[in-house]
Amino acid sequence: MLSRNEVACRWLEKAEKDLRVARKILDEPDYSAFHSQQAAEKALKALLIALGKRPPRTHNIGLLLDEIEKAGLEVHDIIGAKILTDYAVEARYPNFEEVVTENEALEALRLAEKVVEWVKERLREKGVACLG
């Protein structure tokens, strides 16, 4: 059976894979933004797991940040990542009103990278050493 920290590291590994995909497909802004959201979501869930919390089944970044705050960590450095929630579902389906632009996809990627790095720092502080 895997330890809590091993499970957290697996979630973080998935987050990093989503970041790599988001970078590679910036020419497809909708899908890049989706993978950026997924990277942030999975990284935050990794942190919750490492903190001994069961992450909620949600794509809502704000809700995940709230759970992390309830666990005793300040999230003000990454609070702007809440906007990534918009890309969880909507970016994957046709919508005639809104289209994800290249600039929005780049900003989503920047935010996701910030979240993943922030999570890595918190994990290190907690003594969780993930490879990679």
Image: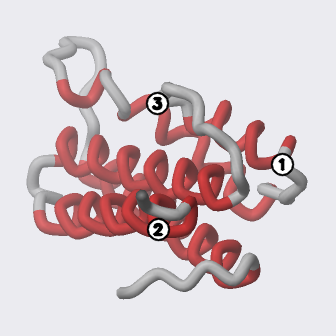
In the displayed structure, 42 sits above or below 124; it is: above
Question: CA gap, disc 3 to disc 1?
Answer: 19 Å
The quadrant the C terminus occupies is bottom left
**Residue 7: horizontal and vertical position, in percent?**
45, 59
The quadrant the N terminus occupies is: bottom left
The residue pinned by badge 1 equals: 71
First in residue order: circle 3 vs circle 1: 3
Residue located 72% across and 57% down the image? 51
Q: Give the secondary structure at mark 2.
A: helix
| Eye-nearest disc, 2 or 3 | 2
Q: Position of residue 12 (x, y in %)?
A: 43, 65
Location of residue 53 by image quarter: top right
Q: Amino acid at mark 1?
A: Ala
Q: Which residue ends up furthest to the front in the rendered image?
A: 1
Q: Nearer the viewer, mark 3 or mark 1?
A: 1
**Which residue is at a point 56% across and 60% down the rendered structure image?**
4
| SS assignment at label 3 | loop
Residue topped by disc 3: 59
- Please identify, in this view, whether the residue under mark 1 or under mark 2 is nearer the observer: 2
Residue at 78% of width from left, 56% of height from top? 75
Of the image marks 1 and 2, the number of the one nearer the N terminus:
2
